[in-house]
Image: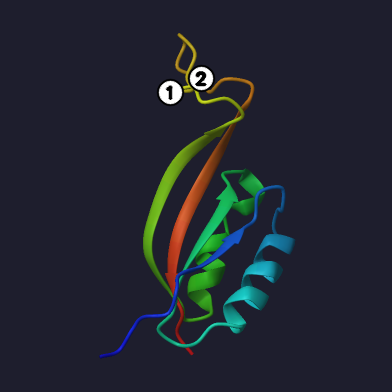
């Protein structure tokens, strides 16, 4: 019986492209072909090319989810006008299947 390897994760909060891509590439290079990794990064304008850059390396984006991180457990973290609260952080979580 074959067991799957534990899922790897990379937290890029506070890191922005191009450094976010550099760290992602170095991280993915340590994994084996077929491994699936979760990558969390901030939804900012500077990080917009991150997914496209990962795909350009030949890796497959398995899933992508937008989420909100809060300092306090507030749900939902949206004010009456529909804007995120000041202590929230817009995040994107992607799952990447490594191709080598």
Report the residue that reaches farthest toward the top: 80
Q: Find residue 4 and report its image quarter.
A: bottom left
Picture coordinates of residue 20 (x, y %)?
68, 61
Picture coordinates of residue 47 (x, y %)?
62, 53
Count of number-bearing discs:
2
First in sequence, mark 2 or 1: give its number: 1
Classify residue 4 as left or right of residue 71. left
Label 1 element class: loop
Task: Name the foreground residue: 84 vs 30.
Answer: 30
Report the residue that reaches farthest toward the front: 1
**Callout in the foreground (2, 1):** 1
Label 2 element class: loop
For mark 2, what is the residue? 83
For mark 1, what is the residue? 75
Identified at 58% across, 59% down, the residue is 49
Q: Is residue 18 visible?
A: no
């Amino acid at each position: 019986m074959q067991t799957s390897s534990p899922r790897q994760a990379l937290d890029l909060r506070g890191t922005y492209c191009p450094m976010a891509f550099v760290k992602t590439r170095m991280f993915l290079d340590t994994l084996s072909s077929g491994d699936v990794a979760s990558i969390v990064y901030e939804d900012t304008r500077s990080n917009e090319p991150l997914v496209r850059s990962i795909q350009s390396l030949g890796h497959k984006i398995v899933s992508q989810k937008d989420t909100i991180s809060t300092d306090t457990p507030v749900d939902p973290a949206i004010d009456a006008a529909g804007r995120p609260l000041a202590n929230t952080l817009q995040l994107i979580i992607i799952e990447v299947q490594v191709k080598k």
